[in-house]
């Protein structure tokens, strides 16, 4: 009997995580120290202290890193620390089945080349951004490498800010089943690995940024610093892998300004009413959604939207792909239902765009739309492709059904 990768990963999450966090000895007398059963915010938790401090960076190194079901693990956040960089040098997947937190506002990087599994009851409790990655190494501006595969290579540690993620020949996958996986407002939540699977999981960064990246062997993803976090740059990546959202998965940065989302992969699929939202709900200006993939498919009522339900400016939705398929009641939209103007929807598909059919009931059509249903203006809808098919009740629209002006198609 064959066992699917998803089932295998789920079995790993259910059977191998014993709450074990084992520091290795690669940092010498600056090794991490794990103290169990510490009172953290009124409940018992494992507290991780020690590590190697280099100005604003705190380095931790573990041979195994897991959080037990309903367990709680927190990193101490010494004064002046901006980035906590945690690597796993052993051979096992990290199974995060409970709460992973930071006692402060530092950004947390968890690097495990073997893979990371976030279970249904996993959650984040931190004040900064979170990056989960299956990179082999973190790169720094001065050429320093903080490597999980070669932990003893020199020079080891640096005061510089991280500048990139270096992946090996077979990047591990990342799976997220959690419905409580979120970072604080305006922060960044990033999952960057081999295949990215989100079966029923929910990722939330209100007015912040979400990064989903699935890269191939020997890739380098650049980290571009912002005031408080990082934006990911995939310009040096030659090969991508697949991203799957299914079972009602939810990726959302909606809020006062709408936040921003970047998705980069080979085959990117949204199924079973899975959604990617960066909607502007107040008076701010949305950051929009960027999806780049060799193939992008939305089906089963799934949606990608930068809609406006307030007075602010909606973000743009930009899709760059070889083939785009929108079917079975799915849609991509930049719609305004209020005073704010919607953003633009741009589709650049080198081979084909297919918008087909309705959902099973026939009541919800598949569509690409910039539209106003209120006082605001609709954005522009631009489609560039070799083959364009709209059939079986699907709709492509840049119109108005409200007081505002429609967009152009």
Image (spheres, grey):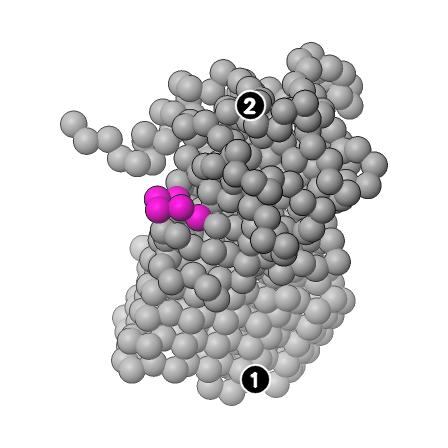
Looking at the image, the residue that sits furthest to the left is 1
Element on which disc 1 rests: loop
Q: What secondary structure predominates along the stretch shown in magenta?
A: loop
On the picture, is 378 further left or further right than 78? left
Comparing marks 2 and 1, which lies closer to the viewer? 2
Answer with left or right where residue 84 lies relative to residue 297. right
Which class describes the residues within 10 Å of circle 2: few (<14), some (14-19), or many (20+)? some
Q: Residue at x 66, y 13 (%)?
A: 36
Locate the N terminus and report the quarter of the image it occupies: top left
The residue that label 2 is drawn on is: 24
Q: Which residues are magenta?
A: 167-171
Residue 405, how many percent across, how many down?
61, 85
Spatial CA span between label 2 and label 1: 61 Å
Residue 366 vertical position relative to residue 25 in the rendered view, above or below: below
User: Which residue does the image show at 53% across and 82% down from the upper left?
Assistant: 380
> Tag 1 or tag 2, which sits nearer the N-term?
2
Q: 77 or 184, which lies in front?
A: 77
Q: Which residue is mark 1?
A: 406
Q: Quadrant of residue 334?
A: bottom right
Is residue 390 shown to the viewer in this render? no
Rendering coords of residue 284 (x, y %): 74, 66
């Amino acid at each position: 009997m064959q066992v699917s990768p998803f089932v295998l990963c789920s079995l790993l999450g259910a059977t191998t995580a014993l709450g074990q966090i084992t520091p290795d000895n690669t940092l010498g007398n600056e090794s991490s120290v794990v103290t169990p059963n510490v009172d953290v915010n009124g409940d018992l938790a494992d507290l991780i202290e020690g590590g190697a401090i280099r100005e604003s960076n705190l380095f931790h190194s573990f041979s195994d890193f897991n959080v037990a079901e309903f367990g709680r693990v927190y990193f101490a956040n010494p004064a002046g620390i901006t980035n906590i960089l945690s690597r796993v040098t052993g051979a096992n997947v990290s199974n995060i089945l409970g709460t992973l937190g930071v006692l402060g506002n530092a950004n947390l990087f968890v690097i495990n080349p073997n893979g990371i599994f976030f279970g249904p009851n996993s959650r984040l409790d931190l004040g900064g951004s979170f990056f989960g990655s299956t990179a082999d190494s973190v790169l720094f501006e001065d050429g320093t490498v903080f490597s999980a595969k070669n932990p003893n290579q020199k020079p080891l540690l640096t005061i510089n800010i991280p500048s990139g993620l270096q992946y090996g020949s077979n990047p591990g996958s990342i799976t997220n089943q959690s419905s409580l996986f979120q970072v604080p407002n305006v922060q960044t939540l990033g999952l960057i690995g081999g295949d990215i699977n989100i079966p029923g999981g929910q990722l939330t960064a209100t007015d912040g940024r979400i990064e989903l990246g699935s890269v191939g062997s020997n890739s380098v993803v650049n980290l571009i610093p912002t005031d408080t976090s990082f934006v990911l740059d995939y310009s040096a990546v030659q090969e991508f892998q697949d991203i799957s959202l299914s079972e009602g998965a939810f990726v959302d940065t909606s809020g006062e300004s709408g936040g921003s989302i970047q998705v980069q992969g080979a085959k990117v699929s949204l199924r079973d009413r899975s959604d990617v939202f960066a909607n502007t709900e107040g008076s701010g200006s949305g950051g929009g959604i960027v999806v780049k993939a060799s193939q992008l498919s939305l089906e089963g009522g799934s949606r990608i939207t930068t809609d406006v339900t307030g007075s602010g400016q909606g973000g743009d939705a930009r899709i760059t792909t070889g083939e785009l398929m929108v079917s079975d009641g799915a849609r991509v939209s930049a719609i305004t239902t209020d005073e704010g103007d919607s953003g633009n929807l741009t589709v650049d598909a080198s081979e084909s765009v297919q918008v087909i059919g309705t959902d099973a009931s026939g009541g919800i059509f598949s569509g690409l739309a910039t539209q106003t249903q209120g006082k605001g203006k609709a954005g522009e809808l631009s489609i560039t492709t070799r083959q364009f098919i709209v059939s079986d009740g699907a709709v492509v629209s840049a119109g108005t059904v409200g007081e505002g002006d429609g967009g152009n198609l």
